[in-house]
Image: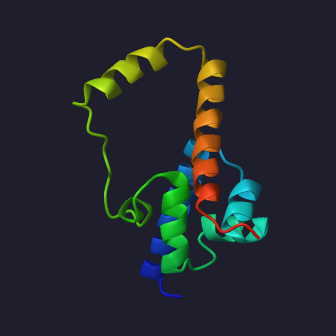
Amino acid sequence: MNEPEEDKRTQVGSRLREARNMAGLSQGQVAKIMGMHRPTISEIEAGNRRVAAEELTKFAEIYDVTVSWLLAETAEKLETDDPRLQLAARELSKLKPEDLDRLMRLLASMRSADTNDGRDSK
């Protein structure tokens, strides 16, 4: 593998790991949602395995980010002029760290439930 390709895989893997952590999900949870084995997620995040376009799309849906952000093509900033986001930020800043962690896990589980609702049940 050439160096630019290796750098890109490392960047994508790093973004995937960052997005997973921000979503409050473990590699095992993501593997289950994606229909993969946990070591595969680890290999992807380490930049040792290519990610197919379909997989990137699914990761973006699970983590609630854009494919462009996962590909490190954009910095992807929030529109902070939305008054609801400003209010939410003020309220979140008042939470104890452990309560904020619990809230982030709750949000991640809600996103995960939304993702699972869209799947065909077997």
Residue 39 figure quarter? bottom right
Q: Residue at x 32, y 52 (%)?
A: 75
Q: Nearer the viewer, residue 117 or 105?
A: 117
Q: Residue at x 64, y 57 (%)?
A: 116
Q: Position of residue 45 (x, y in %)?
A: 62, 64
Tell me: residue 91, above or below residue 76: above
Residue 79 lies left or right of residue 88; in this view the side is: left
Q: Residue at x 54, y 50 (%)?
A: 18
- Quadrant where the C terminus sits is bottom right
Q: Position of residue 95 (x, y in %)?
A: 55, 14
Q: How many marks?
A: 0
Q: Position of residue 66 (x, y in %)?
A: 39, 59
Tell me: residue 84, above or below residue 114: above
Q: Is residue 10 visible?
A: no
Tell me: residue 90, above or below residue 22: above
Q: Position of residue 91 (x, y in %)?
A: 44, 15
Q: Residue at x 55, y 56 (%)?
A: 62
- Quadrant where the N terminus sits is bottom right
Q: Is residue 105 visible?
A: yes
Tell me: residue 77, above or below residue 88: below
Residue 68 lies left or right of residue 8; in this view the side is: left
Q: Nearer the viewer, residue 26 or 17?
A: 26
Q: Residue furthest front?
A: 121
What color scheme is it? rainbow
